Image (cartoon, rainbow, N blue to C red):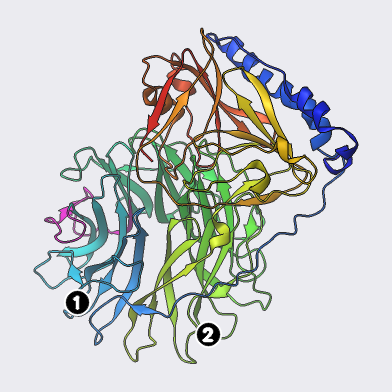
């Protein structure tokens, strides 16, 4: 019976069915799993009314990309010489940091600029490399650490014109000054070659740099880590140890909490394919390579992989793919444990047989994915953009970021997001005349500021403040049900069915609280309110001896673990279990403090089921 068909049942019967309770503190793993599973037994009483046994209609809420990008803004302040290969990062306070290679001195140098007004203007450019000899500094990569330190790496031939090395610098004053450059790689010969570096900062303050290196006679991916803020780097090691004679190219890095992801192209199978390795110890060691594409051994090849971290762990990867007889952009999403959770799906929407290449990807705190690439479908080299709504497996129709002129060439785009729906893109463009410059544009997609609700049961919380909504005003579909938990009585005493529950069954959505939503089909909750900045707190009231409560966070912070929750309570050792639920129908994480290895990552908008040993105040910084 679907939700719509359940109109025959009275709300009183449904509510009484929801009023099962559960209490008891879990201390052993077997008990923990059993008791966490018991939570859904109560909800199963409602599921008869909530989940239709029929195959649901195709989800038809795919949003049209109607928002256009702003007019291009020139990032570099030198118009006479070439600027190329830009990279951009966006911070949570909407600062934009851009770096690129710049020919204003006659040689390629690394320059930097920032925007404090969301890309409307950029500051005077600042040189970041400190080479004093005629040399080339190219292929810049940029990252920002959790404390706001800007990290820059690039390839540099200042030591020998025939030998590129990897150099590093950082800024601890938000780009006002950069420190003395340091050589990262440990190759001291004059005939080896290091190129195309990438850099990330870990959540515990470490720095990891990777690059492609030919010291063994074959191009291989190597990396080095720093535990002292970039003052020194470890001896380098191959990320994926040699297996055969296959070469590796194009390494890119992403970091999510305590994990570092390294993606690259490898010829180990006899043809180039994208792979990923994962490190859980700051880059000291990596897992065996995991292949990202699913094209098998058919002779289809890939190149140019790009990755970005996803909320709650894992990454999204995009690459150039020849499976259709020309180069297209494909992507996969990978879990924090290296499981590919989606099949390959197409990013671009070209049907002309033109080439697409040089993809860049980003993901926001709610799991929406954004991609840009160079596209030749109109006989021009233009930068196109598309986004993937969280929970979907198909990108929306693409749009041009900035229409090029007849003879203009746009290349090397880089995309970043500061919050859901707010997109920033930089690229290389020769629209100004004979030389190429770095341009920036931004776009806002407010419909992406929302939570994905999947068919079945969803355990959600609202991550904003000032939303002032009720179960009836969440924007859910007719027949959906919202269920609230009462921690004082340890019962489900709130249940509202959209479209036919009487007003007296409506209830407010409380801050920092989790709610169950049962839905017949895939849909979205459009978020209202604002992103909080002040400390948030909530009173936890449970019976003497302990009890369950549903916890959420008014925050878009993606650097939280389940293990952080006990420290938020003003009662030492007051939390004995934290559990998260996946809409696919299983408990995706069950954490107990006495078992540190059971820890898991928290995702904005998803609620947690917690067992509190006593009442108290839960406080946290957004």
Q: Element under label 1?
A: loop
Residue 33 vertical position relative to residue 358 in the rendered view, above or below: above
Q: Which residue is mark 2?
A: 380
Q: Which image quarter is the C terminus in?
A: top left
Q: Which residue is mark 1?
A: 107
Determine which quarter of the picture holds residue 538: top left
Highlighted range, magenta: 173-199
N-term-proximal mark, 1 vs 2: 1
Residue 296 can be seen in this image: no
Q: Residue at x 53, y 33 (%)?
A: 513
Q: Main secondary structure of the magenta part?
A: loop
Residue 169 among those drawn in magenta? no
Q: Residue at x 49, y 92 (%)?
A: 406
Residue at the far front in the pictured view: 504
Q: Position of residue 468 (x, y in %)?
A: 54, 46
Q: Is residue 270 left or right of residue 71?
A: right
């Amino acid at each position: 019976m679907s939700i719509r068909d359940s109109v025959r049942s009275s709300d009183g019967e449904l509510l009484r069915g929801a009023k099962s309770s559960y209490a008891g503190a879990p201390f052993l793993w077997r008990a923990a799993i059993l008791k966490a599973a018991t939570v859904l037994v109560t909800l199963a009483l409602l599921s008869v009314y909530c989940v239709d046994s029929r195959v649901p209609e195709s989800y038809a809420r795919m949003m049209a990309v109607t928002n256009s990008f702003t007019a291009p803004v020139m990032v570099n302040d030198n118009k006479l010489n070439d600027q190329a290969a830009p990279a951009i990062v966006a911070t949570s306070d909407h600062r934009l940091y851009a770096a690129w290679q710049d020919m204003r001195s006659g040689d390629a140098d690394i320059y930097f600029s920032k925007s404090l007004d969301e890309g409307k203007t950029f500051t005077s450019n600042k040189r970041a490399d400190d080479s004093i000899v005629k040399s080339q500094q190219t292929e810049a990569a940029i990252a920002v650490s959790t404390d706001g330190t800007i990290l820059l790496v690039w390839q540099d031939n200042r030591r020998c014109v025939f030998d590129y090395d990897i150099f590093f610098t950082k800024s601890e004053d938000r780009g006002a000054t950069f420190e003395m450059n340091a050589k990262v790689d440990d190759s001291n010969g004059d005939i080896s070659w290091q190129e195309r570096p990438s850099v990330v900062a870990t959540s515990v303050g470490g720095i990891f740099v990777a690059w492609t290196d030919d010291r063994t006679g074959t191009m291989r991916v190597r990396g080095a880590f720093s535990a002292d803020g970039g003052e020194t780097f470890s001896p380098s090691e191959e990320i994926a140890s040699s297996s055969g004679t296959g070469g590796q190219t194009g390494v890119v890095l992403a970091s999510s909490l305590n994990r570092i992801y390294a993606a690259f192209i490898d010829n180990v199978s006899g043809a180039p394919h994208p792979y990923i390795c994962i490190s859980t110890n700051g880059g000291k060691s990596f897992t065996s390579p995991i292949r990202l594409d699913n094209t098998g051994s058919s002779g289809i090849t890939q190149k140019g992989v790009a990755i970005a971290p996803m909320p709650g762990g894992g990454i999204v990867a995009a690459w150039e793919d020849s499976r259709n007889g020309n180069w297209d952009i494909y992507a996969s999403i990978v879990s924090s444990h290296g499981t590919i959770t989606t099949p390959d799906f197409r990013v671009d929407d070209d049907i002309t047989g033109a080439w697409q290449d040089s993809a860049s990807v980003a993901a926001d705190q709610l799991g929406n994915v954004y991609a840009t690439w160079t596209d030749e479908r109109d006989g021009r080299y233009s930068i196109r953009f598309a986004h993937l709504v969280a929970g979907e497996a198909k990108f929306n129709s693409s749009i041009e970021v900035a229409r090029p002129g007849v003879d203009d060439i746009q290349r090397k785009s880089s995309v970043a997001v500061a919050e859901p729906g707010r997109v920033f893109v930089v690229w290389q463009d020769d629209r100004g005349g004979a030389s190429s410059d770095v341009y920036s544009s931004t776009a806002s997609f407010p419909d992406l500021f929302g939570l994905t609700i999947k068919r079945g049961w969803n355990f959600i919380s609202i991550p904003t403040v000032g939303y002032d909504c009720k179960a009836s005003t969440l924007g859910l579909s007719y027949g959906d049900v919202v269920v609230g938990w009462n921690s004082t009585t340890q019962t489900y005493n709130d249940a509202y069915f959209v479209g036919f529950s009487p007003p007296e069954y409506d209830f407010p959505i409380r801050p920092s609280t989790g709610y169950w939503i049962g839905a017949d089909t895939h849909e979205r909750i459009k978020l209202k309110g604002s992103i909080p900045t002040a400390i948030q707190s909530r009173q936890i009231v449970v019976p003497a001896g302990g009890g369950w409560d549903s916890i959420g966070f008014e925050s878009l912070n993606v650097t939280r673990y389940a293990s952080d929750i006990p420290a938020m309570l003003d009662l030492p050792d007051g939390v004995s279990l934290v559990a998260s639920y996946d809409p696919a129908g299983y408990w995706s994480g069950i954490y107990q403090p006495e078992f540190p290895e059971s820890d898991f990552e928290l995702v904005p908008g998803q609620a947690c089921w917690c067992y509190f040993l006593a009442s108290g105040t839960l406080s946290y910084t957004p």
